Image (cartoon, rainbow, N blue to C red):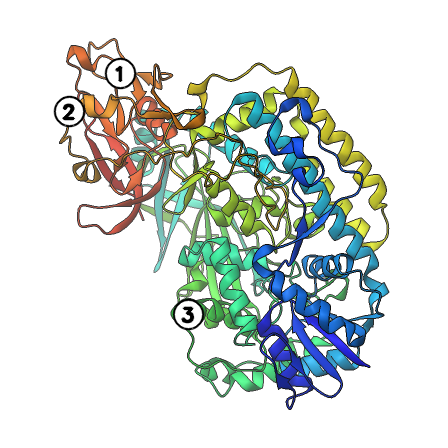
Amino acid sequence: MKTLIIAEKPDMGRNIAAAIDPKAKNHRTYIEGETYIITWAIGHLIGLAEPDAYDDRYKKWNFNDLPIVPEQFKLVPNPRTKDQLKVIAELAKRTGALVNACDAGREGQHIFSLIQRHLKLKHPVKRLWISDLTPETIRRGFAELKDGSEFDNLTRAAKARSEADWLIGMNGSRAFTTKHNELLSVGRVQTPVLALLYDRQKEIEAFTSSKFYEVEAWFEQGETVYRGLWQGDKLTDGEKAAALADKVRGKTGRIESYEVKDTKEYPFKLYDLTLLQREANAKFGFSAKKTLDLAQALYEKHKAISYPRTNSNYVTEQNIPEMHRTLDQLARTDYAPLVQNAERKFVHKNNKAVCNPAKVEDHHAILPTHKMPGALPPDEQKLYDLIVRRFLSHFYPAASYKVHTVVTEAEGERFKSTVKQLLDLGWKVIYADSSKAKEKPAKSRGTKQNQEADDGEEAAEEETSAPFSLDSQQPVHCKDSAAKEKETQPPKAYTEGTLLKAMESAGKQIEDEELRDAMKDSGLGTPATRASVIERLKQVGYVVMQGKRIAMTQKGRTAVELIRGAGVELLTSPEMTGHWERRLNEIARGSASDDTFMQNVKKFAALIVEKVRVQARAAKQAFEGEAAAPAPRRKRAGAAAKSAKEGGSQAATAPGAAKTKRAAAGSRAAATGRQAEPAAAAVSPAPVPRAGGSTGAVTAHAPIGPCPRAGCRGHIIRGRRGYGCSEYKAGCGFVVWKDSFGAALGEADISSLLRHGRTAQMQLQDSQGRAVEGCLVLQDRSTGQLKLEPMKS
């Protein structure tokens, strides 16, 4: 009998057919040859059943019916793709063996396993496990098919992940939603990620900026000029700083110490998916989901890169010849000038920065394949270029520098300087035409980027390609000096890129790359699913994008506060959720029990319900605010939301839950800071969604802070279109529009304006509509007039 090959998607099935049986006949839903029949899933054909499949009473959301803990989980076909499932069932009857050709990872294994379980297929199974879709790799993969039983542990881990997410998401969402009469999405992964955002937002709001001063001096010795930074206790007195600058200006100094050290900077690590998403977000503003979609297109459609959903930055010995072959192919493309100076000798099995089999599990780092794509759409080309340049950089030598560390004394005052003298660009020549060499996207061996000097004192650091030398025995002259006023800066709001980094390390600020590698097994979500978690937070109205930064809505803030207030801190704990992820990885390796894991999950689901049962109901106003992201569409009564591919997002739409409307945008005048409308328009209350769709008026808003207008005793409150004074009826005209200079201002921004006179750095638009990075400054404390202050370069 023939063998049935089941791929994850139609394109993959067609690629496999073209590689192993090009004469096979295409029957639209499958391709049949003499030996094989190739068909495909269309993503998830099977899912876990909704609660009402176990008992009709679950159609209505009732707190007293919780927790819902099925003894055995039921499977149901996806109604949109049930025809394809029937095709697989019919084809299986004519075949004697199966090949699982779904994606080589936990989720691909799960997709195949669900089909196998639902259709009760008893065929012997082989597993195709490959990292790219070039014909040569596919043919080699079929020559080296693995026994399906080798992946039983991975199947158990995938099943446990799916069922755990259902239990936590379904019970958590129903418990909090029915208790507080507001649709609240809860999940194993999404909730701790939301907590990361909440905690950062609170840090920003609690931050108090303070002024300090730095004293710089410029010294010269012959033709050499260098800058030094005054060493001493932090200066908070401007007059004292100015006096220090005056004290040394024009005076003769001496070199107290002078050290010269040779150092090298090696290429940044090859990409895993998370690192690729982070850099594409920083460089191009791509969302995590967009980067994943582009990478999938480069992998599946163009076969131009290897499997993208990887968590490894390294390759194995078997990949080295393929890397050399790809280098040869790139010599025939626009990358030829860069290939010309590349040297194969740098990429070999003993180079642990590239080849480290111990750090490759399912898939190696993302690499370009030897199949050169034709003309790519612009965004795909940008991502492909990132991957190719990172690949090429490893065929170049390290960049080499001389680091000169100088301590200069003048008039009893000490100044420290660090001059980084470039000797050889090495691999950085790869980025010379894209200014990438100036960026610092990730640390690599041999570098201490952005770190302070070893003694804890800050030095003035400069980089130069010009010769630099000093005679430590000769005096120096202080040609100029200056005191500079600076301000301490609050923590930065998360972007998708920095949030991905935090998810990878379960929220821990880990800068050491080796320690970060060790944390990869216990991060929040997986490389394949982190993008969907971020998208889920947007969809349920917990966060909104403001340029590149992620801002929380009032609903998102309240959700975290309620979950923590109920006493289920574990649900918002990144570290604990990271431990869950590690346990799932241990199950996949066969070193942990899936039964024990699931028993603990069931106990935790029951604990959530009991904690929420005794919690006081939240006031309706607690959820009111800028509904900056649309809520999920309302379904028929009792229908529960489908599971997201990453669990943790099994939210459900409660019966009668109303749609949330977007807050009205501010006036066009607000985009340039002009006060074109009366304050009453800002403070007038927004409609409040009620259960059943009725709408009521906001009765009160929590004050954000006192009104800054001289003599006014009012407080600034949030209204429909802006933030205005509670005394507007008495004539106070202070108002800040929500939509100002292209940014949607949230309460944290207004709080910062009231307390510090300025917002944090953000993406804005100037009066010409051009994108600019900067902050908004409160120009007029009587009217709320704002001005844009671009970030100093």
**Label 3 or label 1, whichever comes before in sequence order:** 3
Instruction: Please state which amino acid type lies under the numbered disc 3.
Output: Ala
Q: Position of residue 244 (x, y in %)?
A: 34, 32
Residue depth check, mark 3 versus mark 2: number of the one nearer the observer: 2
Q: Can residue 402 be spotted in the picture?
A: no
Q: Position of residue 765 (x, y in %)?
A: 25, 46
Residue depth check, mark 3 versus mark 1: number of the one nearer the observer: 1
**Dot 1 corresponds to which residue?**
707
Q: Which quarter of the picture shows residue 380?
A: bottom left
655 sits left or right of 378 in the view: right
**Dot 2 corresponds to which residue?**
678
486 to 433, vertically: above or below: above
Counting the numbered discs, the total is 3
Q: Which quarter of the picture shows residue 589?
A: bottom right
**Dot 3 corresponds to which residue?**
432
Depth order, front residue of 89/218: 89
Q: Position of residue 222 (x, y in %)?
A: 35, 58
Q: Name, please, the residue furthest toward the front.
A: 56
666 sits left or right of 692 in the view: left
